[in-house]
Image (cartoon, rainbow, N blue to C red):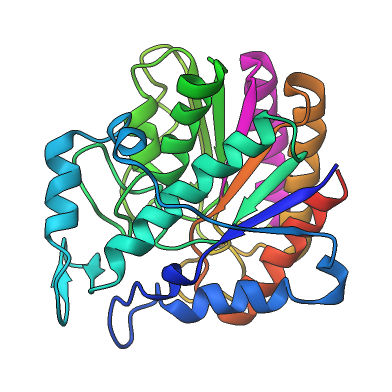
Amino acid sequence: MTTLLYTHPACFEHDPGRGHPECPARLKAVLDALDDPAFAALERREAPEATREQLLRVHPAGFVDQVLKAIPEHGYAGLDADTIVSPGSGRAALRAAGAVCAAVDAVTRGEAGNAFCAVRPPGHHAEPDRAMGFCLFSNVAIGALQARAVHGLQRAAVVDFDVHHGNGTQAVFWDDRDLFYASTHQMPFYPGTGDRVERGRFTNIVNAPLAAMSGSEEFRQATRDIIFPALIEFQPEIILISAGFDAHVDDPLAGLRLHEDDYAWVTSELVAIARQVCGGRIVSALEGGYDLNALGLSAAAHVRALMEA
């Protein structure tokens, strides 16, 4: 089956300012890596803008309006100390969320086996009524509810291997028995959530925190022994991946020690689980990753594993 790549030039227009780690060069590093002839079989599609209806499945109307009205005509504005927006940020955020929804549509309709959304800003820290951690809208959560509302896939799972816990996705999913969130992440670390005792109202949240300096062995054991069994037991109808690559040993913002092979491994394992439980349906979206070389190599390893499905 085909793997789709969703992206859009508008995602380069989100400029958080000089020296900010969540910079446009991140997306260029990913797309440059995927321009290699090894990825010629990728089917590349333009990400649409998310509709207001899609955003409102996760975020209150007042919050959506607040974020979009905060986008400056010139210069920069801060939604919090780390989450800075510029004139192109609104368009970029709408394309990022829209990419995940379009990917869910395509994969659910059988147009492709899986999809990767090379977009920014990222989304997994965005809570229903709070932008934070470089994130404006909760991209993967919006995609999960697209699967439900449009395609009748009631049970959706998100697996998040970003080095930071996805507090936003967890907050969206907490009270919904048919949404499952699982995360490996460094702890203690930003944003301060993600303890094992955080399990959701219906035991639908699974956190597997890792101590600083943990590497491949600890990551694979936690994923294999904690995340995968819970995911299989949940029996999702679609799996979404929050694909953050900042747990890489070379990443400057964190302290885990993963390598490209770890991202290839976890992706291949998730592909196998998806075949087993949900007809292979996987949609992945870019989250973190701040060393440009490591980011490109890791994203390439991830997409290669998707293409081998």
Q: Position of residue 276 (x, y in %)?
A: 81, 22
- The residue at the point 55 percent across, 43 percent down is 102
**Left or right side of 197 for 181:** right
- The residue at the point 45 percent across, 31 percent down is 196
Residue 270 higher or lower than 33, as above or below: above
Q: Residue furthest bottom?
A: 18
Residue 184 higher or lower than 19, as above or below: above
Q: Position of residue 201 (x, y in %)?
A: 36, 14
Q: Position of residue 273 (x, y in %)?
A: 77, 29
Q: Nearer the viewer, residue 115 or 8?
A: 8
Q: Which residues are magenta?
A: 216-242
Residue 223 higher or lower than 134, as above or below: above
Quadrant placement of the C terminus:
top right
Query: Is any part of residue 204 visible from this angle?
Result: yes
Quadrant placement of the N terminus:
top right
Query: Dividing the picture into quarters, in which one does residue 142 lie?
Result: top left
| Residue 228 within the segment the image draws in magenta | yes
**Left or right side of 195 for 224:** right
Query: Is any part of residue 240 visible from this angle?
Result: no
| Residue 240 within the segment the image draws in magenta | yes
Instruction: Tell me which secondary structure the magenta stretch mostly adopts.
Output: helix
Q: Nearer the viewer, residue 298 or 207?
A: 298
Q: Nearer the viewer, residue 104 or 181?
A: 104
Q: Position of residue 117 (x, y in %)?
A: 58, 54
